[in-house]
């Protein structure tokens, strides 16, 4: 029989530390949370070499009394547990593990001063061992300096991503945390260079301003704000309208009781609220603030406290879905294009209803108002031989109405054009001759952590029709793009392209990965719903559709057109 032995203390410490601080960004998260718990109004973070060399966090919080400074690095030592219960946690920390874990995995120094101390105190610890505890000069607040993180844990160090990726993860983390605390000023610098500076404000508008600073003005302009209170919880939420969507959830944040939470279930609920409004591979951007009575919340399910257990989750989920859905409905958005049959059925139902009444009241919106956006062509004859007929009108700058010998066709111009572009991109790609356009004004894009990815995949991206070069400081200069794309927002296109490349891994012309990538590119060029077209443009589009394979469906699988047989129309009017 194999002998069972206890782990050595070093191994136990290493495992414990690993649970809380598996990477530099996790250390930064714990330190910032401590500063927030200490009621700081300003938190400054500096890092060197992605935080592996050095992490410095300076706050102006309440400080640690010199009597407790040594105790602060002991395992399970915390000042935050009231009445010894996990049932009513209001602080971000409560496990008393972070400083212990960090002290064991680095050279740590803590300089801290409370308002009752005349001078600050400095504690120096090297890989778990206290080296010095002495008076030091310093303001009220705390300075934590972590150096040579994981030096003694080569295994962990080996698994770290590149320094650049770590630095970016830290910056993104600070941005996300700052969304939860618009009253706190945050700064971030990397290798001595300032990267972020956010001023905290206490007024009512501060949250909105912070969202604008972090997620962007475009997002705020394209989103709705909803606020609602229920008995045990309340929501505040900024949710993008469906036309503003992304390839993933990266720009979204869920903040529950001031805590950034990773919760797949809630993301699923948010996505469900947009069902029918967004393709399966597109995501809204949502900043959701939830306040929940701490009594129905269990935060202690994961060492890094990014997951939670909510007792009445079903109630929260359904309230959330209802709330978003009803606000989106108020925007008057169409949910999806019904199939021919559903449309016909609805016509027939209306008909039956109306037959019951002696007098038919037309709903108000069937009256064509003078200023309505119907674009009509009465010329041309109907006995044409084209499969999709001749264009007759455009409705709401969204749909083309055409007529064939024996049918009326409604075409979703955006969906149809997307398919046309995709099929053309595909053809060019497989023939190895993507024609490109040289940009008159090359576009400079800041691509941050994706720079490595871009250059390792440069050849593949080149074959898709994009030419770009390094432009220094994590940015690239885009010089050429596929010709068929016309005038597009290159920044957003690249964002999506990169997300898709990450998702599919290697682009393989032999499988669906290429279809996915090209389809995301096609999506950017397509004539948007909302573009006014003249009759020639409409007819040109119909002729292109006829030549394009798969043109009956858009890239997301919805129909691009519906056709009503004149016979069916006659039937609707009871003529046959
Ligand atoms: P926890 O946050 O779970 O209590 P930590 O190990 O993160 O555990 O911190 C231990 C204790 O050290 C805290 O409870 C707090 O009293 C003190 N502390 C840590 N960082 C700070 C800080 N920036 N300002 C004031 N006190 C701090
Ligand atoms: Mg803590």
Image (cartoon, rainbow, N blue to C red):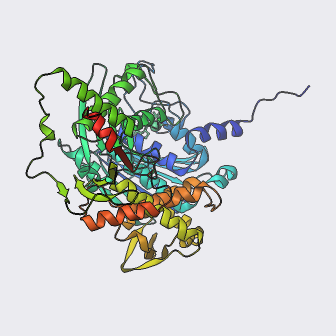
- Residue 544 x, y percent position in the rendering: 41, 65
Q: Quadrant of residue 253?
A: top left
Above or below: residue 528 compared with residue 294: below
Left or right: where 64 falls relative to 6: left
- Residue 32 x, y percent position in the rendering: 41, 45
Q: Please tell me which residue lies in front, 93 or 431.
A: 431
Quarter holding the N terminus is top right
Q: Residue at x 68, y 36 (%)?
A: 12
Query: Residue placed farthest to the right in the image?
Result: 1
Query: Residue placed farthest to the left in the image?
Result: 370
Q: Residue at x 38, y 40 (%)?
A: 340
Above or below: residue 559 compared with residue 385: above
Q: How many marks?
A: 0
Quarter holding the C terminus is top left
Q: Quadrant of residue 339?
A: top left
- Residue 62 x, y percent position in the rendering: 33, 40
Q: Residue at x 55, y 53 (%)?
A: 503
Q: Please tell me which residue lies in front, 334 or 90.
A: 334
Q: Please tell me which residue lies in front, 44 or 70.
A: 44
Left or right: where 208 falls relative to 484: left
Above or below: residue 446 compared with residue 315: below
- Residue 425 x, y percent position in the rendering: 50, 66
Q: Quadrant of residue 151?
A: bottom right
Is residue 490 visible to the viewer in this orientation of the structure? yes
Is residue 461 visible to the viewer in this orientation of the structure? no
Query: Residue placed farthest to the front in the image?
Result: 576
Left or right: where 110 falls relative to 204: right
């Amino acid at each position: 029989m194999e002998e069972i032995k206890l782990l050595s203390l070093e191994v136990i410490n290493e495992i414990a530390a690993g649970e809380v601080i598996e990477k530099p960004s996790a250390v930064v998260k714990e330190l910032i949370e401590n500063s927030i718990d200490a009621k700081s109004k300003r938190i400054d973070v500096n890092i060197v070499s992605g935080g592996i060399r050095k992490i410095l966090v300076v706050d102006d919080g309440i400080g640690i009394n010199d009597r407790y400074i040594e105790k602060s690095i002991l395992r399970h030592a915390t000042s935050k547990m009231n009445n010894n219960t996990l049932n009513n946690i209001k602080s971000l920390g409560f496990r008393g593990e972070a400083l212990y874990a960090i002290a064991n995995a680095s050279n740590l120094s803590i300089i801290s001063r409370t308002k009752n101390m005349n001078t600050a105190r400095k504690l120096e610890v090297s890989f778990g061992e206290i080296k010095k505890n002495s008076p030091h000069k310093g303001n009220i607040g705390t300075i934590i300096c972590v150096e040579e993180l994981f030096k003694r844990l080569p295994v962990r160090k080996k698994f770290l991503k590149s320094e650049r990726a770590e630095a970016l993860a830290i910056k993104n983390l600070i941005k996300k945390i700052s969304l939860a605390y618009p009253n706190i000023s945050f700064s971030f610098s990397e290798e001595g260079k300032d990267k972020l500076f956010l001023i905290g404000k206490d007024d009512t508008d501060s949250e909105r301003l912070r969202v604008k600073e972090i997620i962007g003005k475009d997002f705020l302009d394209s989103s709705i704000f909803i606020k609602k209170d229920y008995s045990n919880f309340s929501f505040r939420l900024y949710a993008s309208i469906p036309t503003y969507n992304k390839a993933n959830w990266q720009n979204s944040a869920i903040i529950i009781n001031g805590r950034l939470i990773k919760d797949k279930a809630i993301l699923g609920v948010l996505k469900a609220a947009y069902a029918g409004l967004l393709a399966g591979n597109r995501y809204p951007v949502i900043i959701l603030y939830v306040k929940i009575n701490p009594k129905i919340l269990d935060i202690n399910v994961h060492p890094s406290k990014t997951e939670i257990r909510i007792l009445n989750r079903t109630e929260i989920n359904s309230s959330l879905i209802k709330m978003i859905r009803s606000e989106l409905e108020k925007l008057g958005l169409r949910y999806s294009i019904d199939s021919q049959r559903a449309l016909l059925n609805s016509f027939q139902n209306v008909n039956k209803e109306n037959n019951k009444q002696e007098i038919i009241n037309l709903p108000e919106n069937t009256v064509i108002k003078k200023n309505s956006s119907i674009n009509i062509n009465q010329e041309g004859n109907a006995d044409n031989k084209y499969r999709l007929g001749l264009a007759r009108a455009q409705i709401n700058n969204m749909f083309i109405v055409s007529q064939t010998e024996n049918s009326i066709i409604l075409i979703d111009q955006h969906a149809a054009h997307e398919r046309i572009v995709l099929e053309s991109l595909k053809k060019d790609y497989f023939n190895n001759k993507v024609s490109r356009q040289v940009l008159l004004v090359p576009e400079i894009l800041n691509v941050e952590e994706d720079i490595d990815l871009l250059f390792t995949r440069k050849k593949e991206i080149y074959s898709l029709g994009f030419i770009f070069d390094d432009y220094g400081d994590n940015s690239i200069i885009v010089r050429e793009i596929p010709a068929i794309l016309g005038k597009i927002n290159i920044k957003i296109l690249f964002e999506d392209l990169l997300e898709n490349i990450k998702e599919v891994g290697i682009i393989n012309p032999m499988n669906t990965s290429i279809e996915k990538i090209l389809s995301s590119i096609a999506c950017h060029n397509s004539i948007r719903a909302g573009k006014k077209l003249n009759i020639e443009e409409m007819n040109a589009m119909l002729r292109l559709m006829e030549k394009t394979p798969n043109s009956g469906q858009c890239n997301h699988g919805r129909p691009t057109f519906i056709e009503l047989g004149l016979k069916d129309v006659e039937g609707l009017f009871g003529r046959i």
